[in-house]
Image (tube, rainbow, N blue to C red):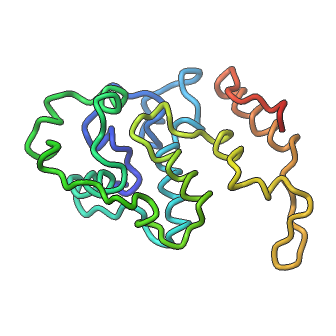
Amino acid sequence: TRYYRAPELILGSIRYRCEIGYVFIVFLRPPVFSLLDAYRWSCGCVFGELLKNHVLFPGQTTNQQLQLVINILGYPSPRDIAAMRVTTEVLQSKDFRDDTMKKPNPGGFKMLVKRADHNALNLLAKVLVYDPINRLSGPRFLENSYFSELFDPRTRRNGQRIKILSKKDFECAIAGDEILTGSTTTDTSEM
């Protein structure tokens, strides 16, 4: 749906790659594409919803959806525009020109998700970026310090021990990616 649509799709990119999101699945065939890469933007939006307890970017129209993203991320740089594979004609249209879009909110994600801690906001800012290749994938997402307590056997929630993710669990998840893509992108030797 619109709320989870990557900005490159909103801007009409027609040269799809695996970084876009769930819409992409029907256009690609393994081994070109990884499920972890395909869901980056959409997963970032869901993570933001968990932090906010509400839809992160609730645009009522396609243009408003993009405006909400720009309010937080700022207008895409020339490098971002190239990475999103968006045509110059689209960006020069009256709907998407830099001078017609509102300027970004200086508070960024902190203004959008007021109660989230610093680590959560940093993680969100690493997933929700314009450049599809620079969006964190599943393994890199879980390696972020925000999730470090999941790997700590001393972690207790509500006084109860929680099932801890082990290095073996993480390696199994990566092995599943290897089956789909033919390669891994994460070095687990440091865990």
- Image mark count: 0
Quadrant where the N terminus lies? bottom left
- Left or right: 96, with 143 as reference point: left
- Left or right: 20, with 120 as reference point: left
Residue 162 image point, x, y percent: 86, 66
Residue sitting at the far front: 106
Nearer to the camera, 28 or 7: 7
104 relative to 86, above or below? below
Residue sitting at the far left: 94
65 relative to 176, above or below? below
67 relative to 156, above or below? above
Residue 155 image point, x, y percent: 86, 65
Residue 84 image point, x, y percent: 35, 31
Q: Residue at x 27, y 44 (%)?
A: 75
Q: Residue at x 41, y 66 (%)?
A: 111
Residue 106 image point, x, y percent: 34, 58
Nearer to the camera, 4 or 126: 126
Q: Residue at x 17, y 36 (%)?
A: 91
- Left or right: 155, with 118 as reference point: right
Quadrant where the C terminus lies? top right
- Left or right: 1, with 184 as reference point: left
Q: Residue at x 87, y 61 (%)?
A: 163
Displayed quadrant of residue 116: bottom right
